[in-house]
Amino acid sequence: MSEPARLRSFLAAHGGGGEAVIAPIGRVGVRIVVVGTDGAYCDAIAPTVAEAGQWCEQAGIAVADEWTRELAASVSPRPADRRRMAGTGR
C-alpha cells in the first residue's frame, strides 16, 4: 500500500477527515503527523517536504503550517501511545 493510500485509510477509519503537520527531522527526511477527526493520530516519513506535501494532497489531507494549540489539544493518545512516549518500551 502506498503512503497516500495508507493515510487515506487512516482518515477513513478515524472520522473521515483530519489535518497534517509536516516537520523536517534531519537527514532522515520529513515527518508527517496526521490527526484524525476523532483525535487519533498516525505518522509517515517522507524523503522531502515537497514529497510529503504531495502525499498529503493525494490523500486529501489539509496541511497546517504548524502545530496550533487547537490541533495539539485535539490529539487523543491511547494508553499504548502514552507508554511508548514515556520510554518504557512496553
Image: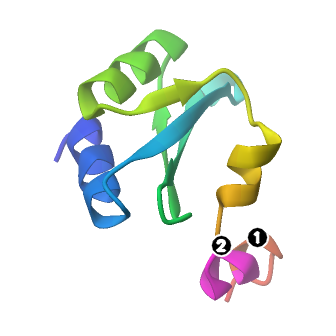
Mark identifier at residue 25: none
Q: Is residue 18 magenta?
A: no
Q: Quadrant of the C terminus?
A: bottom right
Residue 12 position in % (x across, y down): 26, 57
Query: Relative to residue 70, is residue 29 depicted above or below?
Result: above
Q: Quadrant of residue 55?
A: top left
Q: Amino acid at mark 1?
A: Met
Residue 58 position in % (x across, y down): 25, 25
For mark 1, does the 10 Å Cα neighbourhood hold few (<14), some (14 to 19), or many (20 or more) residues?
few
Residue 70 position in % (x across, y down): 74, 46
Which of the two residues, 31 or 17, is positioned nearer the viewer here? Answer: 17
Q: Report the side of 81 relative to 9 (left or right).
A: right
Residue pictured at 58% horizontal, 27% vertical: 30
Q: Main secondary structure of the magenta part?
A: helix
Residue under label 2: 77
The reply to whether the C-beta atoms of the residues labelled 2 and 1 are less than 8 Å apart is yes
The label nearer to you, 2 versus 1, is 2
- What secondary structure is found at the residue carrying circle 2? loop
Query: Relative to residue 23, is residue 32 depicted above or below?
Result: below
Residue 19 position in % (x across, y down): 51, 39
Residue under label 1: 85
Q: Amino acid at mark 2?
A: Pro
Which of the two residues, 13 or 43, is positioned nearer the viewer here? Answer: 13
Q: Report the side of 64 relative to 62 (left or right).
A: right
Residue pictured at 83% horizontal, 76% vertical: 86
Q: Is residue 79 magenta?
A: yes
What kind of colouring is applied to the model shown? Answer: rainbow
Residue pictured at 81% horizontal, 75% vertical: 87
Q: What is the spatial separation of the Cα atoms under label 2 and label 1, in whole angstroms?
A: 10 Å
Earlier in the chain: of badge 2 and badge 1, it is: 2
Magenta span covers which residues? Answer: 77-83
Query: Relative to residue 44, is residue 16 depicted above or below?
Result: below
